[in-house]
Image (cartoon, rainbow, N blue to C red):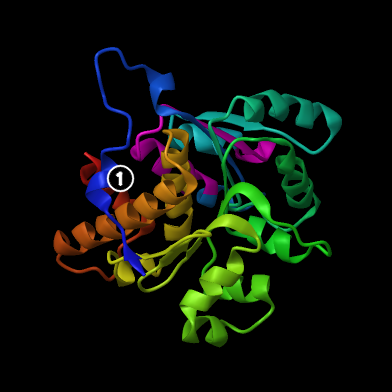
Amino acid sequence: MKKIDSRELLQKLPPLTKESNKYSFGHVVIIGGNVGYAGAVKLCAQAALRSGSGLVTVLTRQENVSSIVSTRAELMVRGFDTQTSGINQARPILEKADAIVIGPGLGRDEWANHICSMIEDFTAPKVLDADALWNLCQRSEKQRYQNAIITPHFGEAARLLNCTSEEIRKDKKEAAKSLLQISECVVLKGDHSLIANDQDIYENDTGNSILAMAGTGDILAGIIGSFLGQGLSLTEATCLGTWVHGKASDLLRENTRGIRGSIASDLFPYIQEVIG
């Protein structure tokens, strides 16, 4: 297995110059936040901002719009339903996206299922996370998603591969390879997360138990989506995103007297510090 060359990957992010503008750093569209789950899509969107995205748009349930805007004024937020009018409003936004993240707080109802079906129409690179992965498990016809990354933990990987979490844990490398039947790039999350593509497997050496809390997976999806939007390849964005996510947790641990009681959003200032 290969190690992640974080120094080389960080240099691939677009430089900050006097000529730069918000479009120089990519437009990421994040879809999620079903009723009662706005927090997940908020964390994901804020992570994309903190990772350097120039523009971040959230597509969510109409009920969530005001709460998300009040949390982070820098976000563009659109509420939509699955009726024709709602889809027509979302379509031009998705067509202009440099990267799409789908899944944080998405839910498992008709709204979520419809969105997962619709998303296949768009060519931007995608991160399929959380409930988007659950939706994949429900489909009778399996397919490989092109230009896409999936981000399963052991439980989600077990559902995708129709096996047990313990089987995944015993042979993470083989599990990561098997998950490539679903997408072009995979990050199998856990202690020493593995990133796989058709040629290589990379092992991440950053991260600690702080990441074993609600919301950190949403943050990882936002970081990876941000790096995709900034022009990195699927593998580059996944490797760098996983490394940055873990490194931010390492810095949080070093700079906090006690890690018990840390929350996912505590990572944000350290993400910014890691990427410079």
- Residue 78 higher or lower than 176, as above or below: above
Label 1 neighbourhood size at 10 Å, few (<14), some (14-19), many (20+)? some
Residue at figure coordinates x 51%, y 50% from the top left: 39
Q: Picture coordinates of residue 75 (x, y %)?
A: 48, 30
The number of callouts visible is 1
Residue at figure coordinates x 72%, y 58% from the top left: 108
Q: Picture coordinates of residue 84 (x, y %)?
A: 85, 30
Whether the magenta-drawn stretch holds residue 63 is answered as yes
Residue at figure coordinates x 26%, y 24% from the top left: 16
Asked whether residue 214 is in view, the answer is: no
Q: In the image, what residue type sits under mark 1?
A: Leu
- Image quadrant in which you'd find residue 95: top right
Q: Picture coordinates of residue 245 (x, y %)?
A: 34, 55
Residue toward you, 2 or 9: 2
* Apparent side of residue 49 relative to residue 117 in the rendered image (left or right): left
**Which region shows up in magenta?**
41-64
Q: Disc 1 marks which residue?
A: 9
- Residue 54 higher or lower than 214, as above or below: above
Asked whether residue 221 is in view, the answer is: yes
